[in-house]
Amino acid sequence: MGTWIAFGVIALLVVFAIMTYNSLVSRRVACQAAWSQIDVQLKRRYDLVPNLVETVKGYAAHERQTLEAVIAARNTAADAKGIQERAEAENMLTGALRQLFALSEAYPDLKANQNFMQLQEELTSTENRIAFSRQHYNSTCAEYNATTERFPSNVLANMFGFKKQEYFQIEDPEHRQGPQVKF
Amino acid sequence: MPPVTFNTLIARNKRNSVLLILGFLVFFVIFGALIGEVWGGGDMGFRIGVPVAAAVIAFVLTLMSYYGGSSALLGISQAREMKKQDDPQLFNVIEELAIAASLPMPKIYMIESRAMNAFATGRNPQHASVAITRGLREKLTREELQGVMAHELCHVRNYDILYAMLMAVMVGTLVMLADVFLRSLWFGGATRRSRQRSSKGSGGAQIILVLIALVLAILAPLLAKIIQLALSRQREYLADAASVDLTRNPQGLASALMKLGGDSQPLEVANRATAPLYIMPPVMKNLSEKRSDIFSTHPDLKSRVERLLSLTK
């Protein structure tokens, strides 16, 4: 009788171990997938920028400085390597784009241009997508990290070398502010 | 007192939903057993058989509505499917949310009505659709639109449509059971069998049992409806809180709700059956007055906005 009980307990433990291991794997994979999602959205932004610059040139060619700043920022961001460098380059690009859109206020023809409006919407959406994919990355990260810390899954995590993942931090406190709603 | 975050609200609402459903199940089983008792007069087979039979019927009906799908609902609402070129901003807003929630893109439908409302349908995130009225689409800002869509997507994500189907079937079965029981009493067939079977002569106890069952049979449909509506309200609060989890912007949904509150345009295509799926109870032509609290499918506007705004620092 005793051996059967022992068998049962061991079997249960093994099943539990397998389930926990798999859950750790799924969460880590989700984390990694979320990270590459951020890349996808960043690339979308790079692809949109040249189009935007061309449209603006048609109406505001003499605003060369701003336009060139945008192109330069975009190229830097596309070439940046490493998380820190990338984050900085992305911030610069956001700043340059903001200036470009502020500029368009002075050119009513440009503002009314269909193409420009569409691009504006697409770029707004892209900024949001980047923000949302970072948010999503952080929450999958949190879930994975919690699983590696919680008992009893932390036992397996240590056994099989599941390390914690880093969160995506915002360097610039200005970026922490949410959008203001105007009624 | 720790500050209320959307996570607290989400946890609280999920717990309340579970409690409500459990309560309902317990009630269902007791009621079924009681009826079985009365019909069978102490026969164990009946005491177990009736609840089991009712459960089986409920299960089959659930399967039918689960796979019956959302196409019926969309058809009734005269919704038109949209492509990205028709409304890029709407698509973008929803796609952003799909990224934040890691959900597949739902199908998007437009309802050509000046009323302001939106709903989501679909048994799971892989088969989901969201619909919005023209009136709402035109009156909301991008942020408010995102808040509303987040709310609808969270209904899909939390399987609220499935919950609603389950509850509808269970309530329906309960009502049917109560009805059958009452008819059986009326035509006297039921008690004859119990008089024959109960040789122990506990006639008094039998009568009390019958009375209790009778009272319950009359009240049960009402109680079931109340529980169903309470659950519906919990799920609405949950969708509100979960939408903040997605957008991190309670203001968006709050101001959308306030705009919705001011609208008194009736939504012609809505009816009692489809009303709970909308974001706000649609103003229907044949409901002359506002529903009072325990009978509404949605919590009242003021509480929803208050809860949302309490999440802003």
Image (cartoon, coloured by chain):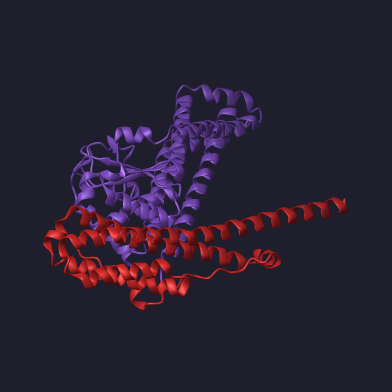
Chain colours: A red, B purple
Say whether residue A131 is visible: yes
Q: Nearer the viewer, residue B162 or A113?
A: A113
Residue occupying the far left of the picture: A108
Q: Residue at x 32, y 58 (%)?
A: A48
Looking at the picture, does residue A22 appear above or below residue A101?
Answer: above
- Quadrant (top left/top right/bottom left/bottom right) for the C terminus of chain B: bottom left
Q: Nearer the viewer, residue A47 or A163?
A: A47
Residue B278, given in percent of the width and then of the height, sits at 32, 45
Say whether residue B313 is visible: no
Residue B145, given in percent of the width and then of the height, sits at 28, 54
User: Is B294 on the left or on the right of A109, as rendered?
Assistant: right
User: Is A23 on the left or on the right of B143, as rendered?
Assistant: right
User: Is A27 on the left or on the right of B253, as rendered?
Assistant: right
Q: Quadrant of residue B41?
A: top right
Looking at the picture, does residue A183 appear above or below residue B269?
Answer: below
- Quadrant (top left/top right/bottom left/bottom right) for the N terminus of chain B: bottom left
Looking at the picture, does residue A36 appear above or below residue B47?
Answer: below
Q: Residue at x 25, y 62 (%)?
A: A53
User: Is B45 on the left or on the right of B269, as rendered?
Assistant: right
Residue A117, given in percent of the width and then of the height, sits at 21, 56
Q: Nearer the viewer, residue B142 or B32?
A: B142
Q: How many labels, in total?
A: 0
